[in-house]
Image (spheres, rainbow, N blue to C red):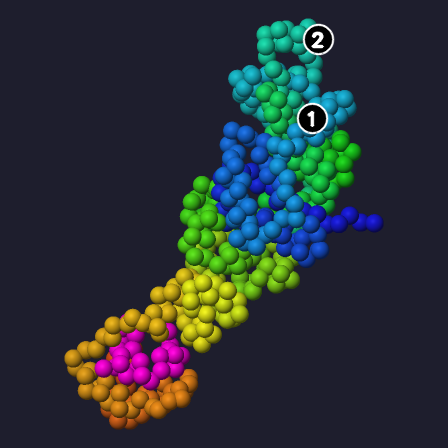
Amino acid sequence: MTAMPTVRYAPSPTGRLHLGNARPALINWLFAKANAGRYVLRLDDTDTARSTEAFARAIEEDLSWLGVIPDFKVRQSDRTALYDTARDKLIAAGRLYPAYETEEELDSKRARARLLGRPPIYDRAALNLTPEQIAKYDAEGRKPHWRFRLDGRPVQFDDLIKGPQTVNTASMSDPVLIRADGSYLYTLPSVVDDIDLGITHVIRGEDHVSNTGTQIEIFEALGGKVPTFAHHNLLTGAEGEGLSKRIGSLSLGELHEAGYEPMAVAIEAVLTGTSLPLEPHANLDELAGVFSLSAVSHGSARFDPAELASLNTRILHQMPYETARPRLEPLGLASEPLWLALRGNLSVFGDIVDLATLVRGPVTPVIAAEDHDYLAAARDLLPAEPWDETTWSKWTDALKAATGRKGRALFHPLRLALTGREQGPELKSLLPLLGRTESLVRLS
Ligand code: GLU
């Protein structure tokens, strides 16, 4: 029996999520949807100095705004006992060893290696410490940090996005898994959790490819099943620079505040840097139907703010009334003809409130002195009701014949009188919403 596909998204609650973080969050989600799998939210909060409860809450809010509702949630700070068990197992197996070097000692070792033209790899001096030296350090009150003894071999894996990969752990320093204060760095808890939670697919940014070599060795040392890996390209700015957690304007919270549709943000976050076109999809289920890991490109994934804005308006301009209705109701604007007449002019959904005043008032008509006679003719020629989308052209055709006006001179005074604005929604849709009585008032 094969295990149920299980993925995890593992942010650290040390800041607000930004567009770049939405990429692995959503790619994991779409993978879980497409494969009838489970989605775990794992909060990597072992860095207690920088992790906060407020950030943890904000992460869940931002994910749920995007439509990502994890099947279950864990936090690493609740799971220390599991990591302690793994630690003891690795120590017993001779794979985890104490090292006493201070930062300064390590720095000077690295400097010496550079001088000799050698790679600055940790020399494993700690493996040769005598019991007397260890006793002396202990007496001095020096606390060890703990390093994982790498096999030092080409570790191979088949990446679902990048294809066959080899990470040679011989060219890496034995990684520190536990700090001198006893706290865990990211690497060991991540592997222990992936084993414990039955993670079948680890989908994350390509900045983790080299970690994967180390982690596969740890999976094997702990006797765990090595998951399948997929490393995606990272979203960057126009110049290829990283989208840091600190770019406030691209935090999901601020994109939300600015009125972006979550689907526009989701599509931008997922489809940038893939072979798939950036075009509207109604919801994440539909996106899951078109997305696949094999569509993720091996090149860069550059974010263009103009694309996000354009996606947002395209989504609004084609949004069906049934989708908009629950959001129109609390605004008192739940009317299908109103929505259909106005949606084509929205930049963000909230613009509907202002646009609706064009229909429901108050509107201050703008009438230039030289247009008084023209508007008198316009009132006279206003067709009898019932009105529909053809009323506008019947009316303006008649006006054209009667006055000889055409183009802007024909249309613009009508727009200014009927809406009080230079620009706006198509008048052929607005007119039937206004009705004859209100139109006459505004034309006067
Ligand atoms: N907390 C890690 C990060 O945000 C998780 C990486 C992983 O998915 O293993 O980079």
The one nearer the camera, 296 or 251, is 251
User: The residue tagged with tag 1: helix, strand or loop?
Assistant: helix
Mark on residue 84? 1
Which kind of residue does numbered mark 1 sit on? Asp
Say which residue label 2 marks.
131
Q: Which residues are magenta?
A: 416-444
| Magenta stretch contains residue 442 | yes
Sequence order check: which comes first, mark 2 or mark 1?
Answer: 1
Mark 2: give few (<14), some (14-19) or many (20+) Cα within 10 Å: few
CA distance for labels 2 and 1: 24 Å
Decide: few, some or many residues near mark 1? Use Cα within 10 Å; few <14, some 14-19, many ≥20.
few
Question: Is residue 201 depicted above or below 423 in this figure?
Answer: above
Decide if residue 200 is on the left or right side of residue 278: right
Q: Position of residue 351 (x, y in %)?
A: 39, 64
Prevalent SS, magenta region = helix
Q: What residue appears at the point 26 percent right and 81 percent down from the top-left corner? A: 441
Name the residue located 70 percent from the left edge and 9 percent from the top edge.
130
- Give the left or right position of residue 117, taking residue 256 as reference: right
Q: Is residue 77 above or below residue 58?
A: above
Q: Quadrant of residue 274?
A: bottom right
Q: Quadrant of the C terminus?
A: bottom left
Q: Nearer the viewer, residue 366 or 178?
A: 366
- In front: mark 2 or mark 1? 1
Q: Of the residues shown, which amino acid type is indicated by label 2?
A: Pro
